[in-house]
Amino acid sequence: MSILWTLISLSLILAVRSSAAEIVPPRTTLLDNLRIRRGAPFRIALFADLHFGEATWTEWGPQQDLNSVRAMSTLLDKEQPDFVIYLGDVVTANNIVIQNASFYWDQALSPTRARGIPWSSIFGNHDDAPFEWPMEWFSEIGIPQIHCPDSNASFAGAEECSFRGTTRSELMKSETERNTLSYSKNGPQDLWPSVSNYVLKISSSSDSQEAVVYMYFFDSGGGSYPKVISNAQVKWFENKSKEVNPDSRVPEIIFWHIPSEAYKEVAPKSDLRQDCVGSIFLEDVASQEAEQGIMKVIEERPSVKAVFVGHNHGLDWCCPHKKLWLCFARHTGYGGYGNWTKGARVIEINEKPFSLKSWVRMEDGHLHSEVLLSS
Amino acid sequence: MSILWTLISLSLILAVRSSAAEIVPPRTTLLDNLRIRRGAPFRIALFADLHFGEATWTEWGPQQDLNSVRAMSTLLDKEQPDFVIYLGDVVTANNIVIQNASFYWDQALSPTRARGIPWSSIFGNHDDAPFEWPMEWFSEIGIPQIHCPDSNASFAGAEECSFRGTTRSELMKSETERNTLSYSKNGPQDLWPSVSNYVLKISSSSDSQEAVVYMYFFDSGGGSYPKVISNAQVKWFENKSKEVNPDSRVPEIIFWHIPSEAYKEVAPKSDLRQDCVGSIFLEDVASQEAEQGIMKVIEERPSVKAVFVGHNHGLDWCCPHKKLWLCFARHTGYGGYGNWTKGARVIEINEKPFSLKSWVRMEDGHLHSEVLLSS
């Protein structure tokens, strides 16, 4: 068992290292803004709920991470996206026994980085969740021999191979400092404990100053604090959107991890609407714990076309809600609950004439649930 | 509000400091073992569920800590115990916003230290619980201005005034390194994440080598890991008790925080036994999450006379169970749930002839629920 674990770990580390060394371009080749290529659509792939680092002390866990690397690689090669969004629950921190969960976070980034594709990420409720001790470790079997990949030390009961977790700020710092391709941002300090709050502009092929779409990213909480978008984040969005897109001329799309309560209203499992587009409707919406006003502001802002969330692995629909769309991504990772086949929601932006489309691409190559979100 | 808070804090700090400076004897005056004084009974006061540091950002919280200091002081002056046991939930770590919860832990120790009385402590489920963000801090009111007593800095959203908590090991290290009167021990490393596992000997007035009673202390978990006494702790007890008291000649008493499942069986709320002795029977027993064998070992060991726990603030009974007694302490702190009047269970050991008695002393002075546990 231990030898197999070591082999799997080693192959994963080698896979990550060799691919990471290949293609990463130097910072100077990056534009400050993301930019649509002339005559081509701009495609974004959403990687949702990868859950790296799950059950690290088993053979199953590291194997799932390898499967997730394979799934992402396949999806990237099929869709050739211009940008990737890691939509939260990148890691299962409540299973991670090493001091720095960035070790696993970094593995999740590797297929995208290896292809030179820029990305950004937001936090889910598992990314900084406190370690949850399995009850069986207190029975006769005891605490297993745990391998600590960042220290080369093996562990049997001491605190060196720590269980104290990695904060959102530490994860974000590690991602952005080590990766020239990362567009993630730490977000304003006064929004803490929420961290992944920022805006990205996708600009026109003909004019790098001209915005075609604004993307807003929110930290919807969970893990170390409640699952909520705070009133402070709502105010930040109001101010920020007024600043960057004062007349609501430019279309806007929004990303966070945990569905807001509006998702519950729009598509209750028991009474599915005809105008919803998707392939799995197998769960109740697991929404945020409270609603502090973000939906009201979004609904009243004419430029917001769609919201994209992850969190529910058994849902992949888009449903119309008032004048916008509420969409789930598709479970991309082999970690996390549920045995539904893996895939990624793709968003395609066409500049002239403007359109915003989306579909789900599966790991086996097939495509479904195409929907026009705006034109 | 802020001025009141400052005044309360200041008076608490001054009260703690001035009393702490008075009486602490140097280490050389301490015996390695606790020893019964000739011709006098040996009295132990149990301080259960003090919950210091609760709701630190309100006026209520710091006021409760002052009330708890007053309650302990009164009880100590009335009973004049030879030893104090802090029976867990000394602090409410899930409310503590400063880096080092030892600040509050130390306040809880202060009345005992100020009187030169030795003590030991065990951990409860709140002592290293992760911080729980109040949902209201995410609404319009926002995160309150929080005072950070150990840094003199005030806080409004940065991570300096930390929410990451203090581990059991850190709390224990801080207590034992700073206090010559502390008999607490870190416990064997291989029992980690449980920490407060150790044995203390109370020796005879006529022979310091001769044990009159052994006290075993267990960490019953909770907070950062499940509420359980592990199989490893059971084995440790088997080995340790065989080592120190091989023929079970010396009576033994046991302390941990969370009642084991046997407590549920012995005194269900709905069907109270005639032979239970206590004054409040107002809750269901909130027991540990699993039973890995500690009760079986204890029940089979003839020298074990009683087990003492806290955790349930609304229970203060002792009930016979097989050939021993299962006892609750009495809620001593003004922190924690419940408005029952405060008190402390007292244990009295007489050497010759041997007897083990217990009662509950209330803050208002009256005494009740006296019971003979062994003679």
Image: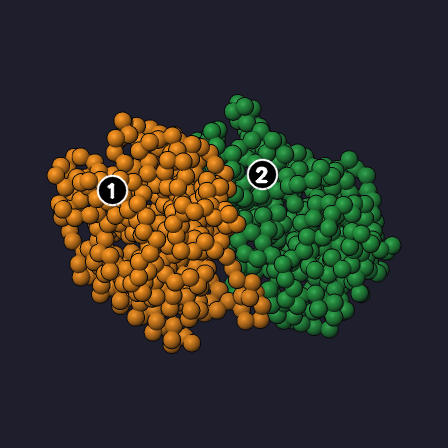
Chain colours: A green, B orange
Residue B2 % position (x, y): 41, 75
**Residue B370 locus on image (x, y percent):** 32, 51
Secondary structure of the residue carrying numbered label 1: strand
Residue A128 visible to an observer of this rendering? no
Front-most of A20 and A342? A342
Q: Amino acid at mark 2?
A: Glu
Quadrant housing the C terminus of chain B: top left
Image quadrant occupied by the N terminus of chain B: bottom left
Identify the residue at horizontal 81%, vertical 45% (top origin): A279
Front-most of B205 and B27? B205
* Crowd class of label 2 (few under 14; some 14 to 19; many from 20; radius 10 Å): many
Circle 1 Cα neighbour tier, 10 Å, few/some/many (<14 / 14–19 / ≥20): some
Q: Which element carries disc 2, helix, strand or loop?
A: loop
The residue under label 1 is B355
- Whether discs 2 and 1 lie on one chain: the answer is no
Looking at the rendered image, the disc whose residue lies closer to the viewer, 2 or 1, is 1
Where residue A120 appears, as percent x and y from the top left, is 63, 52
Q: Is residue A306 left or right of residue B332?
A: right
Q: Residue at x 63, y 34 (%)?
A: A64
Q: Quadrant of residue B349?
A: top left
Answer left or right for A344 relative to B71.
right
Residue at (25, 30) in percent of width and height: B249
Q: Position of residue A223 (x, y in %)?
A: 56, 51
Letter of the chain that mark 2 sits on in the rendering:
A
User: How far is the residue under mark 2 from the one under mark 1?
Assistant: 54 Å
Q: Amino acid at mark 1?
A: Ser
Q: On what subunit does the disc labeled 1 rest?
A: B
Compared with A343, A317 (above or below) is below
> Up-down: is B123 above or below B53?
above
Q: For residue B145, which numbered disc appears in the image?
A: none
Q: Which residue was labeled with disc 2?
A: A54
Q: Give the residue drawn at x 65%, y 57%.
A: A288
